Image (cartoon, helix red, strand yellow):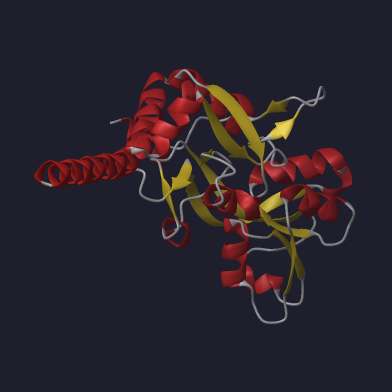
Amino acid sequence: MTSSLSFKRRGALLSALVLALGFAGAAHADQLDTITAAKKIRVAIDLAVPPYGLKDEKLNATGSDVETARLLAKSLGLELEIVPTTGANRIPFLQTDKADIVISSMSVTPEREKVVDFSVPYAAILAVLGAPKSMSITGPADLAGKKVIATRGTTNDQEVTKILPAGAQIVRFDDDATSITAVVSGQADIFATAPPLLKTINEKNPAKQMEPKFTMKVNMLAIGMRKNEPRLKAKLDEFVKAQLKSGELNTIYKKFHGADLPADVTRNVG
């Protein structure tokens, strides 16, 4: 009887030990471990926001965000898997595990910081109000009675919504490509966006002569990730700081944007 009881007790202790080790393993299995084990990193990028993300004449992904993602994958020794997304789907793709991280002209905002974490900024983007050169717009008051296009879920949408005067109408589309098409086709002449997209409109329809009328906000762009992944965040911060210091991120930005990174971004080198 004693021997049987001792055997049962040892069995119970062994089961408890295995269970405890299992919980310990689960506690330490974080996103960085998962990415490393998969030997690839899934990066959500909107490929309809030139020059951040687009497809070239051979339908290959390119743009400053795409090149940044490639540089990251190379530095981590991982395969890159680009997960095409839209502005509205960037955060949902993280939350539903369709992507490991987001590198997709995603601005750091207090609202977004409640649901995702960010690396230190790797670039910057202006939120501007664009319109044809012939149109006189110097501030929000001049938007009264006018129709403004914005891409749903972007900071441009958020910023123009804050300043829109009474009598103005905002028309939202689900991605930048559709918004650009709407402006090019004449559905509206005013676009809350980033300067590079105004250039894209002018290339598609030179008669538009779109230009920035005023800047709503300067936003820092950072790599987005799920909340509470400290090891992954530390690794991404390390990558951004190292590539800012080496000048690689500035080279990428200048290649696609025709200018150096803003000083607010490069000061993260230290």
* Residue at 46% across, 17% down: 77
Quadrant in the picture for residue 114: bottom left
Query: Which residue is at the front of the view, 8 or 227?
Result: 8
Give the x, y percent position of residue 44: 60, 40
Quadrant in the picture for residue 187: bottom right
Check the image and report above or below for 187 versus 104.
below
Check the image and report above or below for 16 versus 251.
below
Give the x, y percent position of residue 28: 30, 39
Q: In this view, does 242 lie to the left or right of 164?
A: left
| Residue 267 seen anywhere in this rendered image of the structure | no
Q: Is residue 249 left or right of residue 195?
A: left
* Residue at 51% across, 49% down: 107
* Residue at 76% across, 49% down: 210
* Residue at 72% across, 34% down: 54
Query: Which residue is at the front of the view, 146 or 193?
Result: 193
Question: The C terminus lies in which quarter of the figure?
Answer: top left
Quadrant in the picture for residue 49: top right
Which residue reaches farthest left?
2
Count all numbered tags in the image, as a single digit.
0
Give the x, y percent position of residue 213: 66, 56
Check the image and report above or below for 246 versus 68.
above
Give the x, y percent position of residue 63: 65, 30
Q: In this view, does 251 lie to the left or right of 268?
A: right
